[in-house]
Image (cartoon, rainbow, N blue to C red):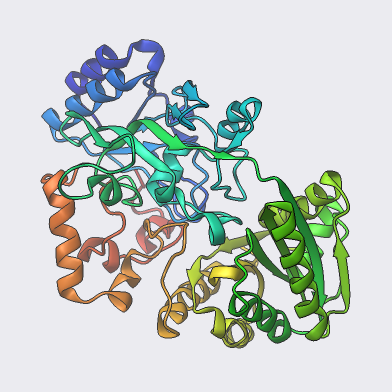
Amino acid sequence: MLGSTVVDALVGAVGEQGVISDPVGLRSYECDGLTGVRQAPSLVVLPTDTAGVAAAVRVCHEHGVPFVARGAGTGLSGGALPVADGVVISLQRMRRVLSVDPLDRRATLQPGVTNLDITAAAAPHGLYFAPDPSSQQVCTIGGNVAENSGGAHCLKYGFTTNHVLEMTVVLPDGEVVTLGGDTGEQLGPDLRGVFIGSEGTLGIACEITVRLLPVPETVRTLLADFDSIREAGEVVSDIIAAGIVPAAVEMMDTLAIRAAEEAVQAGYTLGTAAALVVELDGPSAECDTQFERVTEICERHHCTRLHIAGDTAERAKIWKGRKAAFAAMGRISPDYIVQDGVVPRTRLAEVLGRIADMGAEEGLRVANVFHAGDGNLHPLVLYSEAADEQDRAEKLSKRIAELCVELGGSLSGEHGIGTDKACSMPRMYGETDLATMDRVRSAFDPEHLCNPGKLLPTPRLCGEAPGRYRPHPLEEAGVIERL
C-alpha cells in the first residue's frame, strides 16, 4: 500500500480526477494482453500532458515508488504488468494529434494516439503512417515506440524505429529531455535508437514526432493457396531472391484460416494448408511488372488458387481476414497464448514442422499467423483453462520461443520480451551481453523504479513459477488468508 503522503502528492500532480484508487477500478489495469499473469497496482494516475507525467514520475522517484507506463494495454508480453506496491501511469488521456506538417511530412503526437488515427490525420494530405500492427485500431504510438512494433508492411518499410524522428521523454527521475531531431539523428550516441524498443524501462515518451509517407501510386494485392507450408515458404524465398521487395508477405495456416473465416468471411479457402497474402506498391509500371513475376512464381510452386484483388474493397476484405486472425481464435478455442519469434526465411517449413510436433507432444493445437517476408512467426497456442491445460500451454509457448533462437532467430520480432520471455533471454544472450544491457538501463534508471522486472532476467522473476496465481496449500486448507 502507498502511504498517504505519496497519494496526496500524486493527486497534487495530476488532480483528483486523474487518480484511480478504488479496488474495482484498479482491476482494469491488472494485466495487458498477456492475461495469464495479473497484478493489481496500488494506484493509477492519468495525466493529460507532459508536465503531468513529469510531476507524477518525480513523486515516484522522490519516494522510491516503482511505476509502470501503460498505453492501450494491448501488449502481448506482459510489458505493462503493474507492480503490487507501485503506480501505473496511464497515458490514455494523452490522445491529441499536436501537429501535422504535410510539407515536411511529419506529425507530432501524444503517446495515447492510436496507430490508425495517425494515418487518419495524415490522409487529407495524401500521406500515411507506414508501421501497421494488426492491432492498429487500438494500439497506441507510445506502445509502438516501447515495443518497436512492426506490422504486415514492415518487410519493405521497416519498424517503428525507422519512422520516429524525435521524442520528448520523461526520464525516470522526472527530467524532461528531447531524443532525436528533425532528421531522427542527434550528435553523440543514438539515444533515440536506444530508447525505442526498450519496453518502457528507460522512461516515458510523451510527445512523438513521426515521419509520414506519400500514399503509393499503385497497390496490388493477391491471395494464394498452397497444399503445403513448404511450397508457400519457397514462394517467399523465390520472391526475395528475384530482387522483389513486396510491401507485405503474410502467411496463415489451416487453423488460422478457419478462425478468421468464421469471424469475418473474408473469402479465404477453408481446408487449405497455407494461404499467402502478397502486396506490392509503388509506381504503376514497376508494380505491374513485379506483380506479373510474383504470380508466375506462385503458379510455378503449384498454387491451388490465386485470387487477385480487383479493387480497394476486395483488398480491404483480404486484409480484414488477415488482421482478424488473433481475435478470431476465440471462435475455435476458449483460451490461447500468442507467441512471437523470428527465424530465417529459409527455415519456415522446418520451424512449423517442429512446432506441430511439440504441440502433439503436449496434446495442444497451434495455429500459425506470421509475417513470412521477414520470418516473424506468431504461433497461437490453443488451450482450455477449464480443462487445466494452462501449464502445458505456457510450457509449449516458451519452448516455441526458444526454438526460434535454436534455429538462428530471435525471441521476439515485435511483441517484446516483457515478463513473458525475460527468463529466456540467457538462451539468446551471454552474461556479458545481459550485463551490458543492464548497465545501459541503470544509466537511465539507477534505482530500477521504471517498469521493474521486465525485459532482463532477475533471480526473483525467474525463480517464481510463471502464469496464474497458485494458492499455497495452507491457503487452500483455510489456515491462512491471501491479502
- Is 49 situated above or below 71? above
Picture residue at 41% right of the left edge, 72% below the top: 410
Q: Position of residue 5 (x, y in %)?
A: 17, 19
Picture residue at 75% right of the left edge, 73% below the top: 293
Q: How many marks overall?
A: 0
Q: Nearer the viewer, residue 107 or 231?
A: 107
**For residue 216, what is the image quadrant?**
top right
Left or right: 450 in relation to 100: left
Quarter holding the C terminus?
top left
Picture residue at 21% right of the left edge, 17% below the top: 9
Q: Position of residue 353 (x, y in %)?
A: 62, 87
Q: Nearer the viewer, residue 318 or 180?
A: 180
The single residue placed furthest to the front in the displayed view is: 285
Q: Is residue 255 visible?
A: yes
Q: Is residue 329 visible?
A: no
Q: Position of residue 64 (x, y in %)?
A: 14, 35
Q: Nearer the viewer, residue 388 or 99?
A: 99
Picture residue at 43% right of the left edge, 27% below the top: 108
Quarter holding the N terminus?
top left
Left or right: 165 in relation to 293: left
Q: Position of residue 254 (x, y in %)?
A: 77, 73
- Is 278 situated above or below 219? below
